Image (cartoon, rainbow, N blue to C red):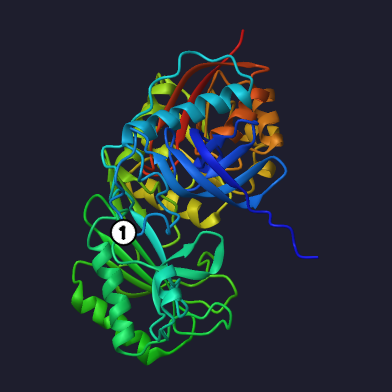
Amino acid sequence: MGRRNRHKTFENLQVIDTGHKGKSVAKTDEGQVVFVDNAIPGDVVHAKSYKKRRRYFQAKPVEFVKFSKHRTNPVCEHFGTCGGCKWQNMKYEQQLFYKQKSVEDNLKRIGHLELPEISNILPSEDIYFYRNKMEFSFSNNRWLTQDEIESGQNIKQKNALGFHIPGMWDKILDLNTCHLQQDPSNAIRNEVKQFAIDHDLSFFDVKQQSGLLRTLMIRTTSTGEIMVLIQFYDDQPKSRKMILEHLKQKFPEITALLYVINQKPNDTIYDQDVICFYGQDFITEVMEELKFKIDAKSFYQTNSKQAYELYKITREFAQLQGKEVVYDLYTGTGTIAQFIAKNVNKVIGIEAVPEAIEKAKENTKANQIDNCEFVAGDMRKVFTKAFVNEHGQPDLIITDPPREGMHKDVVKVLLDLKPKRIVYVSCNSATQARDLEILSENYKITQVKPVDMFPQTHHVENVVALEIQS
């Protein structure tokens, strides 16, 4: 007996909303949930499912019966294959609408929170070419288009430099033009790829764990500085020098030209030695009168202009009077801590990554700030009552955790400490809502402001101010 055909065809599906990870949501007349690829709310489609789960289907459109009035033409030739900018086919005003809606839905549905009027989301001034950091992967087995597969031709050139195809760890989409980072990002990436092909330099084979060229990282600053880092797998000094020297000559505007030799199974560089081939080993970002050195391993908000707006909102929500003791949890390289330092008595920043803390201390010294202290360690283990006894009772706590939110032990300490005010910055309003529900035992929410850091995607930052209940 053959396998039952699990693919189902849906006709005249009305796309009504966006859902988890920005997917477009439709419902059948029977109430079945269908996530439809490359569709937006307002579209009506015939679609065919390719995956079935207990509570939903995933489907691809086979015909658009009606296009949404909120549609726009994607600017990128790679849209629909690349997983990076899934909302390029939606007008920016509607992107903002659904980001705001997702924040409100999460806070109410997950957190069951009593909310003030939520401020309108802050748009991004730049909706393309806004990222200051991009990472690309080399591959000797690029993603082939359907036309290439069906042509039956023997395709010899399979080298690629670009992004992983969503859900396929071993396939790389070869990029021509990416609309996320300003020039000379595209020029540098395409030059590296072409030079490597012309000189027969091997691209990485992820299955065989072999090849010279593994990844390329490009970082830029608002001041015009550029960092380029090539990660090599094979240690071939002659070939390595050849491609780095070419980049040095071709792009004299590069401020920091770096490389890593990494023969681990994974391509993370945080436990690797970064070697400076040319220039300096850092670039410098400027915010107000502050300067921040950024090295290859540093975390810095990837939308520089919007990071400034985010920090201004954080400072505004903090309602600083000049005498506060502030704890900056998950401080990273101490950008928020230093941004508010002149408005408070002192700031204590805590961060798990030791290298980030060292960079925070360097930047504080360079910025001539003497009221910031930084401590490295696991937040759950460092942020205790004993730590507070040593450093002082906080009047204000600013917390900006990773996507998974705060550990429940950290939230418990916040409840026990009862600082007058908390400002919670989050890149994931779902986990933020979970934490806020616990904090609502002692706190009321007074302000909420979403911030769009990542146009053309579903991602959104959210800032919440909380005050102790008397």
- The correct choice, above or below, for 24 with respect to 264 in the image is above
Q: Residues within 10 Å of mark 1 (few under 14, many from 20)?
A: few
371 or 444: nearer the eye?
444
Point out residue 116 in the picture as x, y percentages from the top left corner.
Answer: 49, 13
Q: Element type at marker 1?
A: loop
User: Where does label 1 land, which residue?
Assistant: 77
Q: Quadrant of residue 305?
A: top left
Residue 120 shows in this picture? yes
Identify the residue at horizontal 25%, vertical 81% (top origin).
246
User: Which residue occupies the extreme right position in the image?
Assistant: 1
User: Which residue occupies the extreme front position in the image?
Assistant: 1
406 or 470: nearer the eye?
406
Identify the residue at horizontal 24%, vertical 68% (top origin).
187
- The correct choice, above or below, for 442 with respect to 342 in the image is above
What kind of residue is marked 1? Glu
User: Which residue occupies the extreme top position in the image?
Assistant: 470
